[in-house]
Image (cartoon, rainbow, N blue to C red):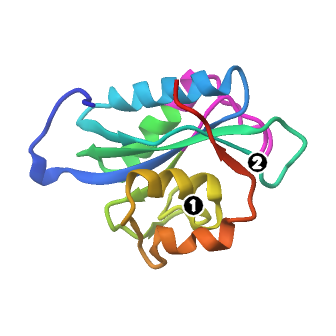
């Protein structure tokens, strides 16, 4: 899977992005999200997980989510990648009315190489990724040996989330 503009491979890093939606045909929203990630400049979509249905976390009075994870090889700096993800969310009509509320699409930057970074608007690795089955299952599907900086292998966190409601969808 390729994106536009292929810069020198030496300047590229691997990033993982979580995709989620529970409004306006969530499966279609996530699939469109994959397509838009593949079009990011200086980036190549190198893997995409299956789709998973999961129960909402936090605010539970809302529809179930469709979730997935994408692997991106990119030369975009982490803050530029975050800006591109937010632009895709806006394009899909994402509203941030309530924390953990319903959304057309949510794109979270999970990992950016082995970077550990924290500011008000960007924390890498994503601070709750190791506690969420809807992140860990699709992540380990496409990157079985993926390491979360400061936490260890992603697959080692799976037993702690095995009680969370998640179901892999059949591919069509």
* Residue at the (41%, 73%) spot, across then down: 149
Q: Is residue 16 above or below residue 107?
A: below
Identify the disc placed on residue 161: none
Q: Residue at x 56, y 31 (%)?
A: 89
Which type of secondary structure does the marked residue at label 1 adopt?
Answer: loop
| Overall secondary structure of the magenta section | loop
The residue tagged 2 is: 100
Above or below, 54 against 133 in this view is: above
* Distance in Å between CA atoms under marks 1 and 2: 18 Å
- Mark 1–mark 2 contact, CB under 8 Å? no
The dot on residue 120 is 1
Image quarter of residue 84: top left
Disc 2 crowd, CA 10 A, few/some/many (<14, 14-19, 20+): few
Q: Is residue 111 magenta?
A: no
Closer to us: 1 or 112 = 1
Identify the residue at image location x=64%, y=60%.
132
Q: Is residue 32 visible?
A: yes
Q: Position of residue 7 (x, y in %)?
A: 13, 39
Magenta part of the protein: which range?
A: 88-107
Is 80 left or right of 73, judged from the image as shown?
Answer: right
> Percent from the top left, x then y, of residue 21?
66, 34
Please give the name of the residue rendered at 71% of the width and 31% of the height, measured from the top-left corner: 95
* Residue density around tag 1, few if under 14, some if 14–19, many if 20 or more, within 10 Å: few
Residue 121 appears in the rendering: no
Residue 71 locus on image (x, y percent)? 37, 46
Image quadrant where residue 63 sits? top right
Number of numbered discs overlaid on the protein picture: 2
Quarter of the image where the N terminus is located: top left
Secondary structure category for the residue under label 2? loop
């Amino acid at each position: 899977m390729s994106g536009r503009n292929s810069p020198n491979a030496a300047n590229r890093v691997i990033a993982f992005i979580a995709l989620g939606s529970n409004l306006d045909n969530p499966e279609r929203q996530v699939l469109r999200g994959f397509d838009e990630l593949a079009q990011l400049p200086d980036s190549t979509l190198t893997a995409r997980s299956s789709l998973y249905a999961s129960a909402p976390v936090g605010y539970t009075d809302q529809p179930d989510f469709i979730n997935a994870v994408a692997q991106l090889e990119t030369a975009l700096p982490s803050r530029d990648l975050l800006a591109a993800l937010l632009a895709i969310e806006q394009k899909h009509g994402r509203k941030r009315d309530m924390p953990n509320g319903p959304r057309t699409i949510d794109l979270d930057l999970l990992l950016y190489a082995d970077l550990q970074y924290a500011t008000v608007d960007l924390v890498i690795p994503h601070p709750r990724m190791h506690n969420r089955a809807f992140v860990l299952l699709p992540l380990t599907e496409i990157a079985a040996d993926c390491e979360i900086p400061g936490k260890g292998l992603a697959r080692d966190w799976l037993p702690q989330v095995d009680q969370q409601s998640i179901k892999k969808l059949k591919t069509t």
